[in-house]
Amino acid sequence: MSEPVIEAKNLRKVYRSGNEDFVALNDVSLTIQRGESLAIIGKSGSGKSTLMHTLATLDRPTSGSLKINNKEVTAYKNSQLERLRNKSFGFVFQQFFINPRSSCLENVVLPLMIMGINPSERNKRGLELLKTVGLEDKAKQKANDLSGGQKQRLCIARALVTNPEVIFADEPTGNLDSETGEMIIELLFKLQKEQGITLVIVTHDNDLAKLCQRQIVIKDGEIVKEKR
């Protein structure tokens, strides 16, 4: 029996805009099992990215409970959340968020540098990950010189470098052509199966969502449907 890695109960996220409140998440409860692949589906403005950001502790909920590995994190200090994110989570976004002037290897090992891992160990791990995503020959090349698909593979390598339990991917193929996008998705699911990583994908692409073991549909900040 699988165990939960993330448990959310009655999550509510309210943004203040001028004199009005905007409810981005309304009473969302969700359990994500270790090693599963989950798609969060919804139209633009539905709350799907807000939900992912809240589950990944990038955003704090206005109210509700969030547990990671059975530990309540809603009351964590910012420094504790940063350590949790750096150690347990990997992120792959539609925008590549890489340092274009740094080498590919430097981009990949950045999370390990933040963790204080020594240079030889982090470079060894970085080179292993570049090989995993098929970029071993690009280690010394500037990240800016890569194609879109290569930049996204670089982001996946960086997301994996800390051996995360969960990878959050927000529209990971949004800026890619269909052929390159398929290659990125194939890589993500291959890594999920081989390494037992929990994969949470935010998408409006139904074909991509169907590749996941479970799909939840979010509308107006609420989960309205769940499919397996």
Image (spheres, helix red, strand yellow):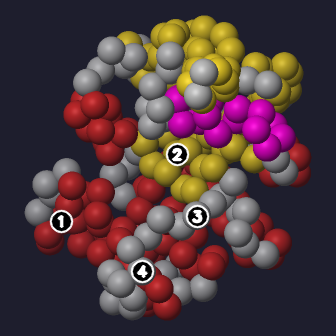
Locate the C terminus by quadrant: top right
Mark yes or no: residue 155 visible: yes
Please report contact status of discs 4 and 1: CB closer than 8 Å, yes or no.
Answer: no
Q: Closer to the camera: disc 3 or disc 2? A: 3
Mark yes or no: residue 71 visible: no
Q: Closer to the camera: disc 4 or disc 2? A: 4
First along the sequence among labels 4 and 1: 4
Instruction: Please provide the residue range marked out in magenta.
Output: 42-55
Please report contact status of discs 4 and 3: CB closer than 8 Å, yes or no.
Answer: no
Residue at numbered disc 2: 167
Where residue 158 sits: x, y (%)? 41, 62
Q: Is residue 225 above or below residue 52?
A: above
Locate the N terminus by quadrant: top right
Q: Residue 121 carries which label?
A: 1
Residue visible at 28% across and 31% down in the picture: 78
* Label 3, label 1: how far apart the Cα atoms are: 28 Å
Q: Residue furthest front?
A: 19
Residue visible at 29% across and 38% down in the picture: 82
Q: In this view, does 72 lie to the left or right of 190?
A: left
* Label 2, label 1: how far apart the Cα atoms are: 22 Å
Which of the pair 195/75 is nearer the observer? 75
Please report contact status of discs 4 and 2: CB closer than 8 Å, yes or no.
Answer: no
* Label 3, label 2: how far apart the Cα atoms are: 16 Å
Residue at numbered disc 3: 95
* Label 4, label 3: how far apart the Cα atoms are: 13 Å
Q: Closer to the camera: disc 3 or disc 1? A: 3
- The type of residue carrying mark 2 is Ile
Query: Which element is circle 2 on?
Result: strand
